[in-house]
Amino acid sequence: MTKPANPATEQDHKPSNFLRQIIENDLAQGTYASRRWAGSPGDAAHHAKGEPDPAKIRTRFPPEPNGYLHVGHAKSICINFGLAKEYGGVCHLRFDDTNPEKEDTEYVNSIIDAVKWLGFDWAQLGQAQGAAASQDCGAAPYQASDYFDFMYRAAEALIEAGHAYVDEQSAEDMRANRGDFGKPGVDSPFRTRTVEQNRTRFREMRDGKLADGAAVLRAKIDMASPNINLRDPAIYRIRRATHHHTGDTWCIYPMYTFAHPIEDALEQITHSICTLEFEDQRPFYDWLMERLCECKLLAAPSPKQYEFARLNLTYVITSKRKLAQLVNEGKVSGWDDPRMPTIVGLRRRGYTPTSLRLFADRIGVTKSDSWIDYSTLEGCLREDLENTAHRAMAVLDPVKLVLTNWDEVMGAGHLEPCTQPALPPAPQGASQGPEEGSVPTRHFKIGKEVWIERDDFLEEPPKGYKRLYPPRAGADGQMLPGNKVRLKGGYVIECTGCTKDANGVISEVQATVIPDTKSGTPGSATVKASAAITWVGVSDGLQAEVRLYDRLFADAQPDAGGKDFLAALNPDSLKVVTAYVEPSLANVPAGAHFQFERHGYFVTDRVDHAGGKLVFNKITGLKDSWAK
Ligand code: ATP
Ligand code: MG
């Protein structure tokens, strides 16, 4: 179980980066101070009727609802929502659903859940710069398909101004005539069509008079531009497809590069932040904004695009197509398999919103591609849970330990109550950690039989081994006593031997209990124990299924350079064991976080943990086990 998130784990002072500098500069210069906001997206005339925009900046997170979001999207969400929050702005959640074929409402809902779960809100104005605390900006999740009417108008406006034409070259001719890096493009024979011809033909495209692919509307810019994206890019295509939102209203759809800047402008976005692969599109973005402001369709000042490096995380794949392949080929149990880097997968695995936000802050924003080590993400999780996750004892590879003198010294069948705090005391001088008296106490009992970890006993211990081992002959031939350890929170015990089954596998370990050494009693320090081991009582321990997850891929860059990522799957990424856990875990809800002492961080499974069936997922170990 966890205490409420400890805000001190997220730095109050975030390091600067190039995006913050741009925003701070724009705020200082008043670049966007004159903007108006009419309460909903719209064209220049619409916003002119509005009030001065209460949002100092507007950013947006624009996923295509064609799959589940992954850890890379989490970075983008944290950047866009985080900046808006910090600078008294608002971040729009916008479904970029202009591509009719691939979208689905299942994805729309999962994206809404992911953004909320990460702790963000698209309707809330950030609190910086003296803005009212919880001013509602009325920004419902937007969808790009709501702007199809405007996009069509914008396309006609470009035609009227001589900035667009309907091209009916074959696809091959169009490709060949575009040229390449060393060769300028060649004008299409349709490039000289009159405004009248273009208007008529474009309306015929819209009205379904032309076959799919028979024509496209192209922006008329410069076929010789060194930037191939400016060589008359296509802005509308014919595609007879039923759109999940607009149905069969349209048989022409805008291209992404045309749609996206317009979506930004209608929503009065100030800073349109995207990943580096769109850098070459920026000149077209600016060109389009200038043309549509010239004809007074869009309000100035226009949004500006800024690019940052996408997240590459070692041992992880972030391509939606490849993630879908893992799901479809049954390599994982679904989109929310705890080994998946999807937000639903990370959540089920036990990652917390705080740990993901911390991760996004820590990796920062840069303009050059690099790889982030997976251990950075795990480190953020540990940092979040270290002071908040309740401790518990669990035995993952159990062997029975019998205290052979128990009945004699403690009383036959006696069960001795033991307690431990659910959280360790805060380190001296620490500002965080539990407050005095706020930490619940865990209760469990010790009796004649307890479960211990199989590897906490060795018949023939190597030098330096400090846990249980039986009496053995010393150098002089004299018998030395078995080793003494403390059963954590219980008694000091002395190992006396073990029993093996027919295969030579140890089936039971024996020891004697040393009375009066119980933890927390005056006698506890009288006998020296060389180690403390974790254990669970046979009388009150609970059986639990524990899913020991590890990295899904054994290769740090499983799909780099077109490698077959399926060949890099880690065969040991999931091991399921039957464990025993202490009785304080009897009624914990799903999604609760724990530190199993000596083992690592665990969470009750959101899907399978339910009434009477305890199921824990391993999130990560206490230390980085992959470090070299
Ligand atoms: P696909 O895998 O289909 O190419 P995509 O990653 O482009 O999808 P979108 O739904 O278009 O997915 O992404 C929404 C936003 O998330 C975009 O602004 C995109 O730049 C950002 N994004 C996607 N992947 C990453 C990543 N690995 N790191 C940072 N941001 C990302
Ligand atoms: Mg995309």
Image: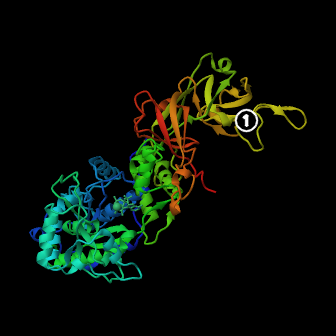
Q: In which quarter of the image is the N terminus?
A: top left
In the image, residue 221 above or below residue 82: below
Tag 1 residue: 458
- Pick whichever, 297 or 225, lies toward us: 225
Q: Residue 347, how many percent across, how many down?
A: 41, 47
Q: Which residue is drawn at 20% across and 52% down?
A: 245
Quarter holding ligand 2: bottom left
Q: What residue type is labelled 1?
A: Leu
Task: Tell me: 154 left or right of 527.
Answer: left
Q: Which residue is drawn at 73% across and 42% down?
A: 465
Q: Residue at x 44, y 53 (%)?
A: 322
* Quadrant of the rendered image containing residue 167: bottom left
- Pick whichever, 585 or 44, lies toward us: 44
Element under disc 1: loop
For the question of whether residue 371 can be seen, the reply is: yes
Q: Residue 48, how many percent across, how many down?
A: 11, 71
Task: Tell me: 176 left or right of 155.
Answer: right
In the image, residue 562 above or below residue 165: above
In the image, residue 579 above or below residue 109: above
Q: Residues within 10 Å of mark 1 (few under 14, many from 20)?
A: some
Q: Determine if the C-beta at disc 1 is less than 8 A from ligand 1.
A: no
For the question of whether residue 43 can be seen, the reply is: no
Q: Residue 536, how many percent across, how many down?
A: 57, 30
- Pick whichever, 518 or 183, lies toward us: 183
Q: In which quarter of the image is the C terminus?
A: bottom right
